[in-house]
Image (tube, rainbow, N blue to C red):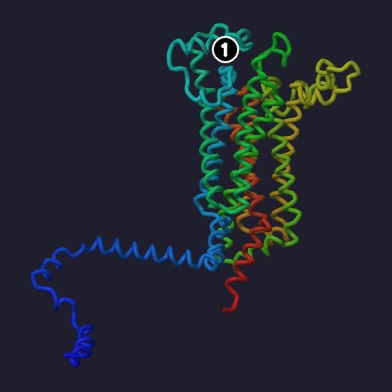
Amino acid sequence: MSLLIPGIRRAVPKLASSQFICRQCLRHKASTAPSRILRSLNVRHASTDSQARFARFFTSTAGPAAAPSQAAKRAFPETDSKAVAYWLIGSAASVFGIVVFGGLTRLTESGLSITEWKPVTGSLPPLTQADWEAEFDKYRASPEFKLLNSHMDVDEFKKIYYMEWTHRLWGRLIGLTFALPTLYLVARRRVSRRVALHLVGISGLIGFQGFIGWWMVKSGLTDDLFAPGSHPRVSQYRLAAHLATAFVCYSWMLLAGLSILRTRRLAADPTQALAQIAALHNPALAPLRRSVHALTALIFTTVLSGALVAGLDAGLIYNEFPRMGLGLTPPQSELWDAFYSRRADHADLWWRNVLENPSLVQLDHRILATTTFCAVLALWAYSRRGRVAAALPASARKGVLGLVHLVSLQVALGISTLIYMVPVPLAAAHQAGSLALLTGVLVLGHRLRVPRSSIAMVQKRLASTTKPR
């Protein structure tokens, strides 16, 4: 027996365990085997546990290796998507619309119908007749109702109220549809650092614009900013600030969106992009580029002058062109009237007449508009000269020609608005034409210049594609 024990010990490990179990037990065990789903869960659980044990065991080794991936997630991308560009351009189009609608609100004298500023609760109009009566009572206390609209009833009040309410609601929607996506895109690092700064700046400007709008309306609700018995109106300075901020906001959105689209086109083909950049850096185009920048400043100044004309209702006098009364200009005594000076020594005579005298304000606007028209024609003629014409890209050449068409249309609208004593449709079209003209010169300047950041990105892309492997 002692001789058999070593052999049994060697044979037992080679025998299967099933040989020591009855067949009925084996059949029962096979029927109660875990399902495929349970087996997968067990395997996943085992792998998760093993990974966790592995991570705990190699904590000091795995930490530095994971750090670059986390840093990459926190970094801003190098380029931006087309969706962001289209969103910016769409927001600019919405600002274009609200600028025109704001002009209609002013032309219909609806801007002073809401006498309170409620950024949140003011989103809803009056819902009951008692609410309408309460709003109408507030409007009755305003100088505009006492001097102009004392005959107005509640139904007529509703018309001008809805104009101003729609204007304010539109502004709120622009703010929400821009600020909320900006918060998401910047927080999640979905845009480049440069675009993130643009988005934050534009969002702040939109909020500031809302404050300026109420600051402007508030100036027309008291009678201490205009002469007793005169036409109630908002301050022409605040109106010009409100319009200028809207134009800056629109321009910022438009150029940011166009820059993203151009950067993507340049990055798609770095070799061709460098050729385009080299063509734009031709010395022959430098004077043209500076002229476009100066023309942009001139158009913006003319727009501000038009805001002063609107704020003073200066378009309702001298409704003829090119003469103003008996000559090309009014009499000197009318242009430099001491009535507008507020100091005993008349030290403020010249600048107060320039900014507050309707006759001189209209003359200034005529001069600036004529200068803008002549400057655009001169720019077009200069762009057709030998060296400049040879170096000018086709897109910029079309931009200059489009600018001639826009300024011609704007001059025709301006003269028609003056001659027909500021009818609402023509005046609104004239205001839209000013923004269209500014758009044309901004697009032209955009086509003549490539930012340094885009050039550096293209050079980096080209170096990465030509780098030997």
- Dividing the picture into quadrants, the one containing residue 221 is top right
Q: How many numbered marks, from 0 up? A: 1
Q: Which residue is mark 1?
A: 139
When the figure is inspected, residue 180 is found, relative to residue 261, above or below; the finding is: above
- Dividing the picture into quadrants, the one containing residue 116 is top right
Residue shown at 55% from the left, 44% from the top: 182
Quarter in which the C terminus is drawn: bottom right
- Furthest-right residue in this view: 345
- How far across and down, in percent of the image, does residue 364 sit? 76, 30
Front one among 44 and 288: 44
- How far across and down, in percent of the image, does residue 21 sit? 13, 74
Could you say whether the residue bearing mark 1 is in a helix, strand or loop? helix
Quarter in which the N terminus is drawn: bottom left
**Around disc 1, counting alpha carbons within 10 Å, would you say few (fewer than 14), some (14 to 19), or many (20 or more)?**
many
- How far across and down, in percent of the image, does residue 174 sit? 53, 35
- Furthest-left residue in this view: 24
Query: What amino acid type should be assigned to the residue bearing mark 1?
Result: Tyr
Residue shown at 60% from the left, 49% from the top: 196
When the figure is inspected, residue 194 is found, relative to residue 131, above or below; the finding is: below
- Furthest-front residue in this view: 2
- How far across and down, in percent of the image, does residue 297 sit? 73, 41
Residue shown at 55% from the left, 45% from the top: 88
- Image check: 415 left or right of 286? left
When the figure is inspected, residue 306 is found, relative to residue 278, above or below; the finding is: above
- Image check: 52 left or right of 147? left
- Image check: 386 left or right of 31? right
